[in-house]
Image (tube, rainbow, N blue to C red):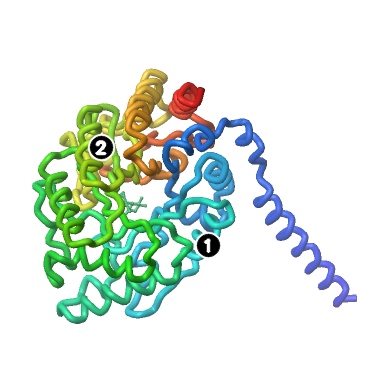
Amino acid sequence: MKKKSNNFNLILIFCIVFCSFSFANNLNTSFLDSIDSLKKYYISLFNIGAAINKDIILGLDMESKHIVESQFNSITPENSLKWMFIQPSPNSFNFKDADKYVNIGLKNNMHIVGHVLVWHSQLPDFMQKIESKSEMNNHFESHINTVVSRYKGKIDAWDVVNEAFNDDGSLRESIFYNLLGNNYIEKAFKLAHDADPKAYLIYNDYNLYKTKKRGGVIRMVKGMKSKGIKIDGVGVQAHWSLNHPSLDEIEQIILDISKLGVDVLFTELDISVLPNPWELVGAEVNQNFSKFEGDPKMNPYKEKLPKSIQNKLAKRYKDIFKLFIKHSDKISRVTFWGVMDKHSWLNDWPIKGRINYPLLFDRKYQAKKAHKALIELGSINND
Ligand code: 9MR
């Protein structure tokens, strides 16, 4: 008798767990099906993508996953391929999440981006403690070779090096620069190319509207091209705001980079609507604005975004996309840095705990006016 009731309890527990699991996986995402798709209008011009976070990759945010699969033809992992997650300790690789990420792209026949091989940020502790050139060199070579080889023929494009320049056009004194010298960038591209000769290789950075910084990147691309080192594109991060940079400045980036004979990619597009401390622009993650935390002036739209700002955001996106369409022969991809507002990194940067609205989908997964504006623009262009 006792045994029977134990079995009954087990069956009950199983049913509860199974039912809640099925419920979580069968969330009603049908409301998303009625939203017109960006890729329908833009795929003929350039790849159109989104960065996806761990929750999307693991299937814990099915609404966002549904949006990604229906709206975009390209994905970038927001964090899951970064060094600290892929190789947390020396020569011990963890590809669990990255494999799942790649499988989403393969299943949906998407253009899959690898982000990022070499970046001074989000490095594991052991990398930050390396002091000798030869040790750094060994890890540098083995990391690039192992990661690129694993996804050979699957990951289409790599952000090979990220944020290697200062705003004045000089090279950032990162751990890679300090230990390997200034040709570490070329070396990274050569290693990536050797590991997957067909992969599309990108140099990625922010603040490229600043002429001095852009100048540094241009000199680097010219140098690499003159030596026959493969580089296919320059990624412009595009963490912008409602007024900065100007459309003229954005157009100048497109013109200057495309002149080098490489593609222009807008790899991390989002538009902050919040006040900018010290008129800060770009994405230097090391700046500290903690003194503004909790300051209501810096977080003015806590409840909701006023209609006037919603309209400004839509117009800003539309103006930017008009420029992208005008120069679509020079642009190979436009990727939004995230899917919906609630999960954007801009809620916590440069000031923690704010409510920002930088993307095309709101906190309830509804398409915002900015999305409608881009659909409208795309459909006129497709007529
Ligand atoms: O969006 C990413 C955020 O979740 C991480 O906490 C952050 C860590 O620095 O990195 C963010 O993504 C960055 C990207 O990898 C490189 N360009 C700047 C992006 C925003 O910081």
Q: Which residue is mark 2?
A: 254
Which residue is outermost to the top? Answer: 308
> What residue type is disc 2 on?
Ile
- How packed is label 1: few (under 14 Cα within 10 Å), some, or many (20 or more)? some
Q: Residue at x 51, y 56 (%)?
A: 57
Q: Is residue 214 left or right of residue 74?
A: left
**How many labels sit on residues?**
2
The vertical placement of 195 against 311, above or below, is below
Q: Which sits in the foreground, 28 or 80? A: 80
Query: Does residue 352 show up?
Result: no
Q: Amino acid at mark 1?
A: Lys
Tell me residue 118's x, y (percent). Answer: 27, 63
* Mark 1: secondary structure: helix
> Would you place residue 123 above or below residue 237 in this image?
below
Residue plotted at (39% across, 34% down): 357
What mark, if any, has residue 100 been given in the picture? 1
Labels 1, 2: front one: 2
Within 10 Å of disc 2 (Cα), the crowding (few <14, some 14-19, many 20+) is many
Distance of mark 1 from mark 2, alpha carbons? 34 Å
Q: Report which quarter residue 84 is drawn in.
A: bottom left
- Residue at x-position 32% and y-position 66%: 192
Residue 260 visible in this rendered orientation of the protein = yes
Asked if 241 appears above or below 263 in the picture, the reply is above
Q: Are marks 1 and 2 in contact (CB under 8 Å)?
A: no
Q: Picture coordinates of residue 203 (x, y %)?
A: 26, 54
In the displayed structure, 378 sits above or below 4; it is: above
Percent x, y of residue 187: 22, 68
Which quadrant of the view contains residue 242? top left
Helix, strand or loop under label 2: helix
Q: Position of residue 168 (x, y in %)?
A: 9, 47
- Tell me the quadrant of the picture where the N terminus can be found: bottom right
